[in-house]
Image (cartoon, grey):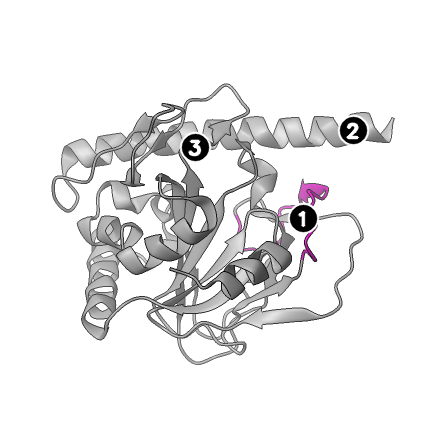
Amino acid sequence: MLSQGQVEAYRRDGYSFPHAALSPAELDECRAGLARYEAWLGAPVNQADRRWRSAAYVFLPWYDRLIRHPKILDAVESLIGPDLLVYTATFFIKEANSPTFAAWHQDATYFGLTPHEHVTAWVALSDATEEAGCMEVVSSNGAPEQLHHAALALEHSINGGGQAIVEKFDQQKTAMMAVPAGSFSLHHTLCRHRSAPNRADHRRVGIGISYVPTHCRLTGTVRMCAPLVRGEDRYGNFEFLPPPESEFASAALARHDQAYRRYRENYAEQIAAHDAAYARAAE
């Protein structure tokens, strides 16, 4: 579990790092699993169809074990309680010496979750150094707030819509969240963050796992699918996703297709809601 001091710092800043998680054997298992996955895809994850970047825990047992890793869950429980769902999880891969980047953004913008208690554990499968384009964050100073975004279709953006914050905010005193392989960082759903291109000679591989307490609900009309990874769900705000039967099992792939389709439907709905809200505010 996180110490009281670490929890207080997270409440103030909106982020915490680094935290050790994977043993050398567990890290090797994840890397080998990723290699099998990319062989199955016939391409690197970040060059395949975008749906294969998200929620691969639905059909990859090694990935399912990762989202349930006790060291990660212990840290997340320290922040949002013992009853935990995974809203989604995403590969964030930057090839060596690539221009891929992320503009300033907040995860909460298009997720449509309330209350704002979602925590992302960003797990490094390779060293996420400053040179490799690790995340850069700005402290919330104890007062996180939602900022106006737009999907700008930015070239080389690691985020699908190229979403970015489009209103001014204080970008002074940033922190570079460098995370060694096998460790993870934590950031709040309203944490403002970005990442630079990978200027290192090695691939930067990370998995962002989005955890929510079971009392969180969606503000839109789409009923999302989520696995329960710790505790119990007394609310039923999400449709339950079971662990995969085996790697690439046909039933699991069918569940992934449904889960991803609903994810995209909710995402599109939330973009429209966000844009409409700021349009009204500007009138």
Q: Can you say whether 75 is above or below 269 in the image?
A: below
Quadrant in the picture for the N terminus: bottom left
Q: For the residue labelled by badge 2, is the local secondary structure a helix, a strand or a loop?
A: helix
Whole-Å distance between the Cαs marked 1 and 3?
A: 25 Å
Q: Amino acid under label 1?
A: Pro
Whole-Å distance between the Cαs marked 2 and 3?
A: 24 Å
Q: Which residue is mark 3?
A: 263
Q: Earlier in the sequence, mark 2 or mark 3?
A: 3
Which quadrant of the figure has residue 57? Answer: top left
Q: Which mark identifies residue 144? A: 1
263 relative position to 56: left or right: right
Quick one: label 2, few (<14), some, or many (20+) residues within 10 Å? Answer: few
Which quadrant of the figure has residue 124? Answer: bottom left
Quick one: label 3, few (<14), some, or many (20+) residues within 10 Å? Answer: many
Residue at the spot x=62%, y=59% of the render? Answer: 13
Q: Earlier in the sequence, mark 1 or mark 3?
A: 1
Magenta part of the chain: 140-159
